[in-house]
Amino acid sequence: MSTAPTASSPAVTYADVAAAARRLDDVVHRTPVMTSRTVDAHVGAEVAFKCENLQRTGAFKIRGGYNAVSQLPPAAKEQGVVTYSSGNHAQAVALAGRELGVDATIIMPETAPQVKLDATRGYGAEVVEYDPTETVREELGQRLAEEHGLTLVPPYDHPDVVAGQGTVGDELFDQVGALDVLLVCCGGGGLLSGCALAARHHAPDCTVIGVEPAAGDDATRSFHSGELQTVESPDTVADGARTPYLGDVTFPLVLERADDMVTVSDAALVRAMHLLWERTKMVVEPTGALGAAALLDGVVPGNDRRIGVVVSGGNVDLSRAHALFERYDLE
């Protein structure tokens, strides 16, 4: 499916990212950058991993979620918020709600990893589970918002969410300086859009590449065609990248600020996840390993360059990770 492009003037600028960084200064962790001689030797590059798997809630999403909820007017905060997510944005909005005293209702697929369901409830949110084969989450979210007077905080297609996610890139460039390449996972495009804005500010010559699972390649096809493409219910182990399409906010930003989009197979993704677990001792979820997979599988060559890789999250059920490693003969 394709529709006419929605590209227009970007709804978010680097100034918004910088403002979000100030807003989040005492809220989120300044996550570490890790390196690995094994990885460097394997890919022929100097690689810097930005470890958002060590962020509060176990993923970068708290940056955008808190940035959005914190800016709501008092009346909206009093009524509460609603969102939909496979897990990481769910936890982010739940925690932001708890920190800011805002009631949060979170719509999650019943197939979401149990660790993400449990954590979201643990932050005090009301979780509404749905069958993704029968229910369109966006429609359910809109209905609940209208029925209960809630403010919808979408997982990626919102200027304040994008600005918050961009602080990942802002921090990375502050920590390591200029990079030749930046690899960022892409689901709905919020993290990629924000990091691309940061890259353009800090290192204009840096090549920003978004990475998707091959089974959910809507953003890659959208980028290369210039028209918004859709993949319904992507069948991939990267549960955080099962979004069907880019949004009205993120599509123009990806078109204008990213330099390329590539895809990796689920097999390559699990191999990268396994290597990161085994050799760097980082617990990384499948979606969080997308950037590393592109590099380790040779989709993006090292070429003796300085390469930043955003490790976006580490929320994975240990039993599910074990099953994935067994499926791909990595045990």
Image (cartoon, helix red, strand yellow):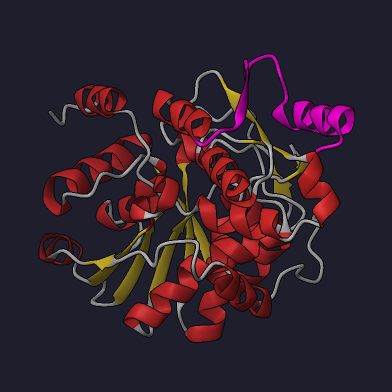
* Residue beneath the point at 88% across and 27% down: 147
Q: Nearer the viewer, residue 328 or 176?
A: 176
In terms of image quadrants, where is residue 136? top right
Please state the horizontal and vertical placement of residue 203, each as a whole percent of the image: 47, 85
Whether 91 is drawn above or below 162: the answer is above
Number of marks drawn: 0
Specify whether 312 is left or right of 133.
left
Whether residue 129 is visible to the viewer of this picture, yes or no, is yes
Whether 321 is drawn above or below 60: the answer is above
Residue 146 among those drawn in magenta: yes
Q: Which residues are magenta?
A: 123-150
Please state the horizontal and vertical placement of residue 282, each as a whole percent of the image: 22, 49
In terms of image quadrants, where is residue 152? top right
Please state the horizontal and vertical placement of residue 229, each as a whole percent of the image: 69, 44
* Residue beneath the point at 38% across and 84% down: 178
* Residue beneath the point at 77% across and 56% down: 72
